[in-house]
Amino acid sequence: MSGQLDNPQLQARVRRQRCSLAVTRALVGLELALVALPLLVIAVWAFTDAWPWPDLWPQELSTRGIQQALSGRQNMGWDTLALSIGIAAACAVLTTTVAALACRALCNFQWHGRSVFQFATILPFIIPSTVFAMGVQVVFLQAGLARTVPGVILAHSIVALPYAIILMTDITRAAGTQRDEAARALGAGPWQMICHVTIPQLLPGIVSSLSMCYIMSFSQYFLTLLVGGGRVQTFVLVLFPYLSGGDRTIACAYSLVFLVITFAVFLIFELILRRFGAREEQNLYD
Amino acid sequence: MAIISRKARRKAAPYLMVLPALLLLAVFVYGVGSGIIQGFGIMPFLDRTEFTLEYYEQALTRADLLGSIMFSLYFSLASAILATIGGVALAALMTRARTGRVTRLFGIQIPITTMHAVVALAVICLFSGAGLFPRLLHVLGMAPDATSFPSVVGAPSGWGIIVVYLWKEIPFIAFMTITIMMNISATLGEAARTLGASGLRTFFGVTLPLCRGAILRAFLVVFAFAFGSYEIPFLLEPTVPKALPVLAYIEFQDPDIINRCYAMALNGIMAGICTVLCVVYYVVLQREHRPKARRRP
């Protein structure tokens, strides 16, 4: 017999650890269930035709809601979707690029005004975006940016910028500049350095920043309403009026389409970048 | 010559790198600023340039303003505090259970991806008078009809608003803290456990203090977001009191454009409250931080 099993204290400790691990797993499972519940309810309602009180399951199911959500009526069609995805993707790329540059300057360089700039980057956190939206409307009208797609992209990028900076700061600091300098010393050109050394190093930060900015832009209602002035019709602008009342089946159908699209695009983003990242890593060690 | 120009380039590099971000932030400041000065009655595009405190006076003496401020502060603070506790717990649980990537994707990324207003719709489907939860109570024999359950829409306690923010922000806080928590747990946490500290003691004595910066930052983000956003209170709040952003937008929409000054005064008050709270938060943070600063890795 090994001494381990004879020791009652150790036995008790192992049992306690197993027990606590089981509890931990159960709690994580509970969280997953709580995440799934509202999404399932929306999915069921999207296919509901009649659901009288107090049944727990709809009496009649139909695809009426989904059909309307995809039919192109009420300004809602594939072009609205394409526009929303385009705006969100442009915002994601613009914001992440700007944030990556800013983070590099913040983490790897000493320069005058650094602390002031660092404070300025959190301003969009502190001042509510509703205040910004109502204030910037007149400015954009004067500048000819109101009611235009570039104006909406610009406004979304401003609000998303501090999130992107937060998501990229730690990894930029951890990456440092030694490897970049080593690459240059070994004869890499600036573009080679950026493509093969800098970006692969920062990839996890870039992925999370891209997806966060994409999501923020895609689900931005108030700012799009004020800057777009109703001319730039994104998915959310079409969806929102249904949420505050009226036909619940239609509202849930639009929401379901929204959920499927955001998550699909989010997954595509992640898969593409992960593949790209994996390839770079292989190249490094081949 | 070449050396000098390289040195100069190196010196100029950080300024060039922050230039795009500075431009975006300048637009932000200019936008907010032009709104704030409208609150003082200055609207250059209407040839009104006279400074006046009239609109702030009107806004501050408004009967429902205090109620709105308290309501906004109440639900955003409640959401932020509860979400921070829940989010840190979730990150700790996931770290402890060593959950795989798929679980994290589902438990954290899906709620972050979901739009706030859609969550509000789901909460309405679940908890409104004819929602799923009252039906369940009815089947269990605890609610005789559809009106016996207090509806989530327009509830004076704002619990629906808080539920929406919790569903969204608990995973967000976990997302903001889980990376650093996993790192600490794998290194210093492991060391503490090897030295005989229990799981809970390791968490409260080692992991939590080291994650404090990330946690407080996430708290600030969640609070300011909940305080300043329009959609969720608009969909779920009671008729009175209204959340500050909703109040300001109602005034902003008034056909009389001069009324905008009044909306902007409300916005100014809102921005002021946020700024004051953030400054207080930073001062507290700095003061608590300073003695320990040298010990931080």
Image (spheres, coloured by chain):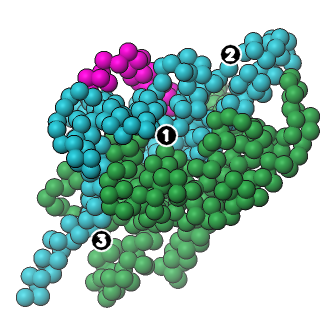
Chain colours: A green, B cyan
| Both marks 1 and 3 on one chain | no
Residue at image position (31%, 78%) is A182
Instruction: Indicate the secondary structure of the residue bearing disc 3.
Output: helix
**In the image, is B123 to the left or to the right of B135?**
left
Q: Nearer the viewer, residue A79 or B192?
A: A79
Looking at the image, can residue A43 be seen? no
Choose mark 1 or mark 3, whichever is in front. 1
Does the magenta run of residues contain A248? no
Determine which residue is flagged by label 2.
B150
Does the magenta run of residues contain B67? yes
Q: Which of B286 and B80 is in front in this view?
A: B80
**In the image, is B190 to the left or to the right of A65?**
left
Q: Which region of the structure is painted magenta? A: B56-84
Q: Which amino acid does label 2 sit on?
A: Pro
Instruction: Indicate the secondary structure of the residue bearing disc 1.
Output: helix
Q: Where B85 falls versus A122 (above or below)? A: above
Choose mark 2 or mark 3, whichever is in front. 2
Specify few, some or many for label 3: CA neighbours under 10 Å numbering under 14, 14-19, or 20 or more: few
| C-alpha span from label 2 to label 3 | 61 Å
Specify few, some or many for label 2: CA neighbours under 10 Å numbering under 14, 14-19, or 20 or more: few
Q: Where B206 falls versus A183 (above or below)? A: above
Chain where mark 1 sits: B
Q: What residue type is labelled 1?
A: Ile
Rendered image quadrant of residue B13 = bottom left
Rendered image quadrant of residue A48 = top right
Determine which residue is flagged by label 1.
B173
Determine which residue is flagged by label 3.
A178
| C-alpha span from label 1 to label 3 | 32 Å
Choose mark 2 or mark 1, whichever is in front. 2
- The x and y percentages for residue B222 are 44, 37
Residue at image position (36%, 40%) is B257
Residue at image position (34%, 73%) is A179
